[in-house]
C-alpha cells in the first residue's frame, strides 16, 4: 500500500510540472493529425469538429474564460472545470499538447467561416433592457442566481444559432448540472427544481426560489427526472425583432465579440 501511495504521489508531482508553452508547433502536421484524431474521440461530442456546433464552449474563438495561455489551456483539458460538464482527461502529456495544437488551429478559423455569434441584426441596448425586463432572463442568469448558467462571455463561446435554439427550445439539450427533478412526498407536497445531490438515504433539490430542500427517501413516494428544462420556451412569447435584439445583447456581453 505504501509503495502504491508513493507511486501516486510521484505521478501527481510529475503531472504538476507543466511546460509553459506547447512543444509542438502549428507547422508539425504529424502532431496536428494526431491531435485531431484525439479531439475527435474525446472532445467532439461537446465541442463539434468545427469548434462551433457542439453543446459545449465554442472553441473556434480567441476568448477563453479560464485562461488562454498554453499552460492554462493545458490545465483546462487535463483537470477539467469544476462545477461544469467539462471533466478532466487522464491522457499522456504529449496527447494533451497535441489536442491543444488542434484547438489552436480551430482558433485560427475565426472569421474565415463566417459563423459564430459576431455582429448581426438587432440592437444590443434594447436587448439588454429586454434581458432585464420583459423576457425575465436576469432572474435565472444574473451573476448571483444559481438556477441558470452565467451568460458572461456567452457570445464568444456559442454561435448565434445555438443561442437562438436554446431560447426557443431549451428542452433540446439540458446540461447535467441543470437537470430538473420532481420530488413528491408522502405528505402530498410536490417540489420541482434542480437536483443538487442524492444518495441512498437523502435527496437534495434547489427549488425555483433557490432554496435547498433536503428530503429523506423514506418520506418520498417518487423522485423523477424530467425531460424538460426549468427555462421556459420563448416560442411565440417574443417577436422576431425582440429575438434579434436579445441575441445582439448576448453576443456583446463582457468577453463576447464586440
Image (spheres, rainbow, N blue to C red):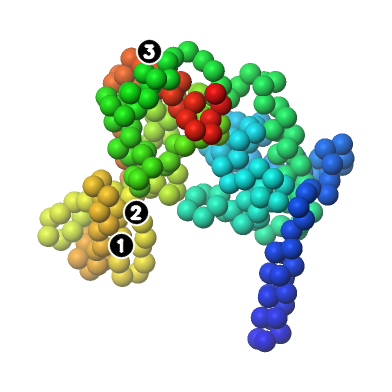
In the rendered view, does 118 fall on the left or right side of 148? right
Q: Real-space Cα distance between discs 2 and 3? A: 35 Å
Vertical order, 146 against 256 (above or below)? below
Q: Which residue is drawn at 30% across and 60% down?
A: 204
Marking on residue 59: none
Q: Is residue 227 visible?
A: no
Mark number displayed over residue 203:
1
Quarter of the image for residue 130 reads: top left
Instruction: Indicate which label's residue lies in the foreground, 1 or 3.
Output: 3
Q: Position of residue 98 (x, y in %)?
A: 77, 46
**Residue for point 39% across, 46% down:** 178
Can you tell which mark lies on residue 195?
2
Secondary element at image label 2: strand
Circle nearer the viewer, 2 or 3: 3
Q: Which residue is drawn at 43% across and 41% down?
A: 150
Quarter of the figure that contains the N terminus: bottom right
Amino acid at each position: 500500500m505504501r509503495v502504491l501511495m508513493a507511486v501516486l504521489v510521484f505521478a501527481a508531482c510529475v503531472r504538476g510540472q507543466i511546460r509553459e508553452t506547447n512543444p509542438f508547433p502549428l507547422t508539425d502536421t504529424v502532431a496536428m493529425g494526431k491531435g485531431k484524431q484525439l479531439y475527435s474521440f474525446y472532445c467532439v461530442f461537446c465541442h463539434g469538429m468545427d469548434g462551433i456546433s457542439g453543446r459545449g464552449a465554442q472553441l473556434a474563438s480567441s476568448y477563453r474564460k479560464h485562461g488562454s495561455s498554453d499552460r492554462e489551456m493545458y490545465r483546462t483539458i487535463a483537470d477539467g472545470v469544476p462545477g461544469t460538464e467539462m471533466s478532466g482527461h487522464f491522457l499522456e502529456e504529449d496527447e494533451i499538447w497535441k489536442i491543444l495544437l488542434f484547438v489552436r488551429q480551430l482558433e485560427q478559423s475565426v472569421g474565415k467561416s463566417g459563423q459564430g455569434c459576431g455582429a448581426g441584426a438587432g440592437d444590443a441596448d434594447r436587448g439588454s433592457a429586454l434581458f432585464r425586463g420583459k423576457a425575465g432572463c436576469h432572474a435565472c442568469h444574473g451573476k448571483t442566481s444559481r438556477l441558470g448558467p452565467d451568460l458572461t462571455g456567452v457570445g464568444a463561446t456559442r454561435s448565434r444559432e445555438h443561442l437562438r435554439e436554446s431560447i426557443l427550445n431549451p428542452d433540446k439539450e439540458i446540461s447535467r448540472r441543470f437537470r430538473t427533478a420532481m420530488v413528491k412526498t408522502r405528505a402530498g407536497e410536490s417540489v420541482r427544481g434542480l437536483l443538487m445531490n442524492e444518495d441512498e438515504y437523502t435527496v437534495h433539490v434547489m427549488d425555483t426560489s433557490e432554496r435547498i430542500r433536503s428530503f429523506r427517501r423514506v418520506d418520498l413516494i417518487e423522485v423523477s427526472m424530467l425531460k424538460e428544462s426549468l427555462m421556459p420556451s420563448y416560442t411565440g412569447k417574443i417577436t422576431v425583432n425582440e429575438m434579434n435584439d436579445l441575441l445582439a445583447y448576448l453576443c456583446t456581453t463582457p468577453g463576447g465579440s464586440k
